Amino acid sequence: MRVIKGLVMAIGVIGILVILALLTGLYLYSLSPSILGKAVPVTVTADAAQSFDDKIKSADIEIKSAIEAGENREIILVITENEANSKLAQMLAESQLPFKRGSLINFGDGYFLTYAVLEAPVIDAKTATIGRIEIVDGKPKIVIDEFNLGKLALPESAKARVEQLANIMLSSRLADVDLDIARVEFKDRQVTITGTTKTGD
């Protein structure tokens, strides 16, 4: 009887500890990430969101024109921090992304910073990332230097997993773009993407 009573008590204590750990985890990931302290607020406007769309459309037309002419033409696309955030705000307002308003993107010198609030069943998760983009065989690869999920202490494998998922999403988005990307440069609060059209030769 004492053994059974002891086991029941032990299971009860373990259950309480697990619940406390879960509650602590939920509380920590709902806190603002430390990376957020490095973020700079960005003003968003409808005109800037339209400018983003216009630049993407113009680049698409230029790429298509070069492909049809069989030319290896250099394409340069410059997106400002204001344009990127304005487009992000528009997509959030239209519920095109699983984030909440208040999410943002910063373009630093040589790096990007993102902050996003993800909707979760109990408590919304606050995530932040600092990373950069390297070019491998004419394709951009996201490299995550720092990743925060609230104030949870995360293993290095978590950062690697986020990087892997980000690159899978990026690859799927660029699959139909006939452009060999040579450079992606973050500077002066903007990102400059330089590439050469593919002719199939």
Image (tube, rainbow, N blue to C red):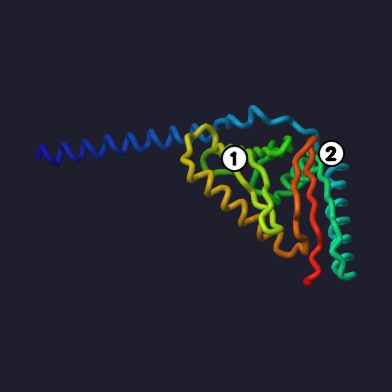
77 up-or-down from 26: above or below: below
Q: Which of these two is toward me, 80 or 179?
A: 179
Q: Residue at x 85, y 42 (%)?
A: 48
Among numbered discs 1 and 2, the one appearing first in the sequence: 2
Relative image position of residue 131 (x, y in whole percent) = 64, 41
72 up-or-down from 38: above or below: below
- Residue at mark 1 to residue at mark 2: CA–CA distance: 30 Å
Task: Choose top left, top right, bottom left or bottom right for residue 130.
Answer: top right
163 up-or-down from 150: above or below: below
Taking the image as shown, residue 133 lies to the left or right of residue 70, namely left
**Amino acid found under the numbered disc labelled 2:** Thr
Q: Which mark is residue 145?
A: 1
Disc 2 secondary structure class: loop
Relative image position of residue 186 (x, y in whole percent) = 75, 41
Disc 1 secondary structure class: strand
Q: Residue at x 49, y 32 (%)?
A: 27
In the picture of the structure, the residue carrying the numbered disc 2 is 45
**Amino acid found under the numbered disc labelled 1:** Asp
Q: Which mark is residue 105?
A: none
